[in-house]
Image (cartoon, rainbow, N blue to C red):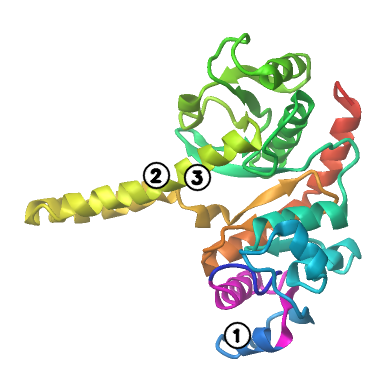
């Protein structure tokens, strides 16, 4: 666990991790990686007796202002580099961070390496739909993609959805500007051909309006488009909250009505809350690397850790490796 990653570290990180240990009855152990004095100071403010953790000293912290690649070269004793190295050496089964996204992606790829058959690792993000959730890949790791990359994203996303979301035969849609197979840029057109010839449950092109409708369990696109979609979706929750507050401010009746609907609204808005999903997985690296939002709350941190544990137990990487060895194109 990157103990000093995130806008509210180390408190939120420590609190969330300790909650995970408490809720699971010390089912696993957490290694807090970061400047030891900072970690101990944070722990002194939180109840932690009897919980299974260790502190691993790392003298440097990668700030959000740092360039990802430069930071890894100049800060080799950072919490991110040290934590991922622990994972590489087998001293930890997974790495979790709410810190610098670019640095976590770069360090995970460079230190852990890629799964055989994977050209580029991808970030998968969850979006609420009318039918539950869908997995969006890529959500920002790769801005420019070739058709083969999109194909591999689809394979990894399908496996993740099957194992982690318990979907028997996940449907895969390719995000484009039209449903017709002739619509899209060169990479999308070629990816459509590859996916059509694969053993995946490929349903063809999907449009932006189809995502929240739940037309596909896995939506595939390049990281540029995916990150725009993700950030737009994240803004929906704040918009709905603002609209509800403004409605309630119009008068006593409106306020009373909003209050009566509070429980229902909380249930509906829960699907839009990033805290419920914790962080996003970096798929395609030789390990388990979970990346969280910089503003992660203790609840989000706890769910990130539980997601990492689940990925380890279900051996997602072995499934990806075996599938890529047998499916078309590799």
Q: Is residue 183 above or below residue 265?
A: above
Residue wearing tag 1? 42
- Residue 3 found in image quarter: bottom right
Q: Along the polypeptide, which appears first: circle 1 or circle 2?
A: 1
Residue wearing tag 2? 236
- Residue 65 found in image quarter: bottom right
Q: Are marks 1 and 2 in contact (CB under 8 Å)?
A: no
Residue 114 horizontal side relative to residue 20, left or right: right
Residue 284 horizontal side relative to residue 143, left or right: right
> Which residues, given as a range, are shown in magenta?
8-36
Q: Residue at position x 62%, y 32% from top?
A: 218
Q: CA distance from mark 1 to mark 3?
A: 31 Å
Q: Position of residue 242 (x, y in %)?
A: 28, 52
Q: CA distance from mark 1 to mark 2?
A: 33 Å
Q: Residues within 10 Å of mark 2 (few under 14, many from 20)?
A: some
Residue wearing tag 3? 231
Q: Residues within 10 Å of mark 1 (few under 14, many from 20)?
A: some
Q: Position of residue 4 (x, y in %)?
A: 65, 74
């Amino acid at each position: 666990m990157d103990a000093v990653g995130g806008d509210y570290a180390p408190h939120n990180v420590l609190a969330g991790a300790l909650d995970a240990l408490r809720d699971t009855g010390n089912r696993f152990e957490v290694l807090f990686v970061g400047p030891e004095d900072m970690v101990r100071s944070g722990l002194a403010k939180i109840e932690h007796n009897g919980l299974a953790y260790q502190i691993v000293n790392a003298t440097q912290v990668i700030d959000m202002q740092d360039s990802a690649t430069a930071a890894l070269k100049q800060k080799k004793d950072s919490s991110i580099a040290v934590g991922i190295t622990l994972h590489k050496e087998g001293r930890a089964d997974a790495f979790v961070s709410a810190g610098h996204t670019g640095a976590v992606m770069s360090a995970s790829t460079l230190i852990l390496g890629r799964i055989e058959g994977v050209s580029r690792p991808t970030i998968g993000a969850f979006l609420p739909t009318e039918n539950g959730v869908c997995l969006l890949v890529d959500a920002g790791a790769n801005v420019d993609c070739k058709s083969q990359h999109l194909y591999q994203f689809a394979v990894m996303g399908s496996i993740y959805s099957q194992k982690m979301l318990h979907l028997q035969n996940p449907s895969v849609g390719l995000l484009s500007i039209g449903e017709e197979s002739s619509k899209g840029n060169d990479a999308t057109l070629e990816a459509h051909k590859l996916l059509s010839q694969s053993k995946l449950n490929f349903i063809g092109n999907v449009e932006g309006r189809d995502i929240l409708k739940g037309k596909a369990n896995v939506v595939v696109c390049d990281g540029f488009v995916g990150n725009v979609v993700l950030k737009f979706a994240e803004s929906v929750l704040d918009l709905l909250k603002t609209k509800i507050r403004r409605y309630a401010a119009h008068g006593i009746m409106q306020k009373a009505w909003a209050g009566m609907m509070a429980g229902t609204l909380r249930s509906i808005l829960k699907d839009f809350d990033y805290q419920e999903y914790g962080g996003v997985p970096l798929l395609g690296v030789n390990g388990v690397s979970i990346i969280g939002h910089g503003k992660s709350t203790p609840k989000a941190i706890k769910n990130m850790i539980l997601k990492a544990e689940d990925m380890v137990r279900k051996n997602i990487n072995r499934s990806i490796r075996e599938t890529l060895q047998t499916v078309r194109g590799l």
